[in-house]
């Protein structure tokens, strides 16, 4: 049985695509600095952090840490550029986005290989990441229909009312390590098209692909200063959250940091959307196709090494017979999962992002066993664990209870916990009681069970016989409960509303 581990189908740009040949080398050099005003800019401070290849542990380059002064200078550039960009006709901005779409496709493999080098995911998965990000650019190409205002004639004698949607100004986009191209595209596609300027603060663990992406967009026609990258850590983040010249903040990361970003940003008067962590459940009932459910669980739990906020980390089996069946099937499939460097053929997932994170994931397995769970498949026994690179194999843990850390915490690794319940009602209650509300799925042959699960669980994104229900680019992405702070989901229609504000004009002549 084939294991589908990538986000979407792989493939290269069509032959003859614009920029496919003769394009400049956009690969970052030995030091990754900032990209401000259309040019590489070295941070003013002397702090540097290593950027490592997770497959070997070797340092491949350094990234400079920005100071508050660097952020201030970048905001000043963005504010000046935003005025001219917003004044461009919408059709002209959308024409640039068409060119951006073609340029990204032309550089798809360049971006994917840099993702592999700094993040560790497989080449097919990295290509899939870029393609899913392109969905947001393609949605933005149709933005004129989404920015049309409303009009009402004669609301009173001789009085008409119409509305417009206008850019919010300068947006800060703070993005995570696990999707260094897709998540920035989720944010900046609508932000740019709506007439805003953007400052992206990528993860310091793998910033190269985000810088390359900004250069590709600038080369494709986004005016200098409209899209900027400011590298750094908490110093840069705090400066962006406090800066009076930043009007909106979009964030993706862990729940504790998302909460802090939301509280600090809103306290400074900014519009904030902060997407946090997850603990996604996959419920399997007696009526489900158990072969399909097992294949889906393996793909959703172990794909990308579990380092994605929509990964399935809990399998909820309704009844012991279902649990035993699913464990047998998943154990068998897990034996065929290939773990290794992302550029090697046939790998299903690569290393985790850092040695510290790999050891943390391994620690959850030890804690689960100590708490009474049964380790059915132990990733620490994989032959690459403890050797060169930050590898750990897939893990399957049975007899997990809701008070164990392997259940309560977002592990962000290739660990699937199995919780046994007696009824579908028990499974639904388990999902409702969990503090996270990003995604959940049910595998069932019953339409009634599927409908109840879809309507009676407090989850933002639901899958029915679909293990990772990430919406396509013309819907919107976001969870409920502790998985989202703010009232706006990401990309799609919600993204347009977040990056614009409405003006209503009442007229009498």
Image (spheres, rainbow, N blue to C red):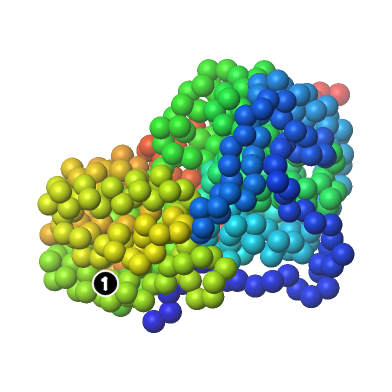
Where does the image place residue 185, in percent across and percent down from the top left?
A: 65, 49
Give SS at disc 1.
helix
Q: Is residue 341 above or below residue 76?
A: below
Out of 173 and 428, give the one closest to the viewer.
173
For residue 71, which quarter of the picture?
top right
Residue 155 visible in the snapshot = no
Instruction: Give the residue displayed 12% in from the left and 52% down from the top.
Output: 372
Which residue lies under the disc numbered 1? 331
The image shows a total of numbered marks equal to: 1
Where does the image place residue 464, in percent across and percent down from the top left?
A: 37, 64
Instruction: Give the residue displayed 58% in from the left and 28% down from the top.
Output: 237
Quarter of the C terminus within the rendering: top right
Q: Is residue 266 above or below residue 210?
A: above
Q: Callout 1: few (<14), some (14-19), or many (20+) C-alpha neighbours within 10 Å?
A: some
Q: Is residue 169 above or below residue 350?
A: above
Q: Is residue 245 left or right of residue 391?
A: right
Residue furthest bottom as drawn: 1
Where does the image place residue 54, in percent across and percent down from the top left?
A: 51, 54
Instruction: Give the residue displayed 80% in from the left and 28% down from the top.
Output: 77
Where does the image place residue 469, in percent across and percent down from the top left?
A: 45, 59
């Amino acid at each position: 049985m084939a294991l589908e581990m990538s986000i979407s189908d792989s493939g290269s740009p069509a032959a003859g695509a614009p920029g496919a040949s003769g394009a400049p080398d956009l690969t970052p050099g030995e030091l990754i600095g900032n990209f401000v005003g259309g040019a590489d800019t070295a941070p003013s401070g002397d702090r540097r952090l290593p950027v490592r290849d997770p497959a070997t542990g070797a340092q491949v380059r350094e990234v400079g840490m920005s100071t508050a002064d660097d952020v201030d200078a970048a905001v000043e550039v963005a504010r000046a550029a935003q005025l001219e960009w917003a004044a461009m006709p919408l059709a002209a901005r959308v024409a640039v986005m068409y060119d951006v779409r073609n340029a990204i496709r032309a550089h798809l493999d360049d971006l994917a290989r840099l993702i592999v080098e700094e993040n560790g995911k497989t080449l097919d998965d990295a290509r899939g990441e870029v393609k899913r990000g392109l969905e947001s650019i393609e949605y933005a190409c149709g933005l004129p229909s989404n920015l049309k205002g409303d009009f009402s004639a004669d609301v009173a004698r001789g009085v008409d009312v119409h509305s417009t949607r206008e850019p919010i100004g300068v947006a800060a986009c703070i993005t995570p390590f696990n999707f260094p191209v897709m998540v920035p595209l989720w944010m900046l596609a609508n932000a740019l098209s709506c007439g805003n300027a953007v400052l992206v603060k990528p993860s310091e663990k793998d910033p190269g692909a985000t810088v390359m992406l900004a250069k590709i967009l600038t080369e494709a026609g986004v005016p200098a200063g409209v899209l900027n990258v400011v590298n750094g850590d908490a110093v840069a983040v705090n400066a962006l959250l406090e800066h009076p010249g930043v009007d909106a903040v979009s964030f993706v990361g862990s729940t504790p940091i998302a909460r802090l970003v939301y509280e600090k940003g809103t306290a400074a008067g900014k519009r904030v959307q902060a997407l946090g962590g997850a603990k996604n459940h996959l419920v399997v009932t007696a009526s489900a196709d158990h072969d399909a459910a097992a294949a889906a669980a393996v793909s959703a739990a172990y794909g990308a090494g579990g380092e994605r906020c929509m990964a399935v980390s809990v399998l909820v089996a309704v009844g012991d017979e279902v649990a035993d069946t699913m464990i047998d099937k998943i154990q068998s499939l897990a034996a065929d999962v290939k773990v290794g460097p992302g550029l090697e053929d046939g790998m299903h997932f690569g290393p985790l992002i850092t040695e510290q994170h790999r050891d943390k994931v391994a620690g959850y397995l030890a804690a689960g066993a100590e708490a009474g769970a049964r380790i059915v498949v132990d990733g620490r026994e994989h032959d690459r664990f403890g050797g060169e690179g930050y590898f750990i194999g897939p893990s399957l843990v049975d007899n997990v209870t809701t008070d164990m850390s392997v259940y309560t915490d977002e592990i962000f690794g290739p660990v699937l916990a199995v919780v046994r319940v007696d009824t579908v009602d028990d499974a639904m209650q388990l999902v409702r009681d969990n503090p996270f509300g990003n995604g959940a799925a049910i595998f069932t042959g019953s339409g009634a069970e599927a409908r109840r699960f879809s309507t009676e669980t407090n989850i933002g994104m639901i899958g029915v016989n679909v293990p990772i229900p990430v919406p396509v680019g013309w819907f919107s992405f976001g969870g409920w409960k502790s998985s989202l702070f703010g009232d706006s989901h990401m990309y799609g229609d919600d993204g347009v509303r977040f990056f614009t504000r409405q003006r209503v004009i009442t007229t009498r002549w």
